Image (spheres, rainbow, N blue to C red):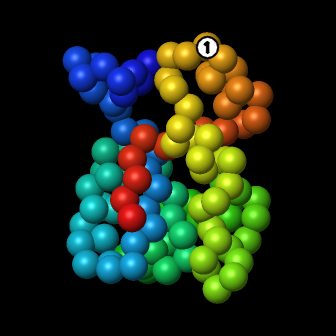
Amino acid sequence: MNQPDRPDHPVRIRRALLSVHDKQGLVELGRSLAARGVELISTGGTARALSDAGIAVTPIEAVTKFPEMLDGRVKTLHPAIHGGLLFRRGVESHERAVCEHGIGAIDLVCV
């Protein structure tokens, strides 16, 4: 189990959220993560850039079940995203809550 609060227990990255304005280096990062078996979740333009490069990506809307709105200003503000980022691995009540709500862990964020 991932325990990010313990420096002697490295976190295995299984799922990453990528949402960048400057796309420089994005494809290389995406390829590197995908080659390691990391699921990539991305917002609009970032998802398009990865997909156009032939990299498998899960659009943010598939996770939140809610479209981007306000010209893309609101896209990651959702419990399915923040719950995946903030729950503490190894804390039973947190593990139970994310399981009950179908929230998957997000181990890496690139913005």
Tell whether 25 sits left or right of 105: left
- Answer left or right for 64 relative to 11: right
The number of numbered badges drawn on the structure is: 1
Q: Residue at the spot x=37%, y=39% of the render? A: 13
Res. 48 in view? no
For the N terminus, the image quarter is top left
Q: Nearer the viewer, residue 5 or 41?
A: 5
Task: Residue 6: tell me if it is visible.
Answer: yes
Q: Residue at x 26, y 56 (%)?
A: 32
At 67% across and 47% down in the image, what residue appears? 80
Q: Is residue 94 left or right of residue 101?
A: left
Answer with the quarter of the image where residue 12 lies.
top left
Q: Residue reaching furthest bottom?
A: 71
Q: Secondary structure at mark 1?
A: helix
Q: Position of residue 102 (x, y in %)?
A: 72, 37
| Quarter of the figure that contains the C terminus | bottom left
Pick the front one: 56 or 62: 62
In which quarter of the view is residue 74 placed?
bottom right
**Residue 110 % position (x, y):** 37, 59
Q: Which residue is mark 1?
A: 92
Q: For mark 1, does the 10 Å Cα neighbourhood hold few (<14), some (14 to 19), or many (20 or more) residues?
A: few
Question: Three-letter amino acid code at disc 1?
Answer: Glu
Q: Is residue 14 above or below residue 16?
A: above
User: Is residue 61 left or right of 101 when viewed as pictured?
Assistant: left
Instruction: Name the residue: 59% across, 47% down.
Output: 82
Residue 100 image point, x, y percent:
77, 28
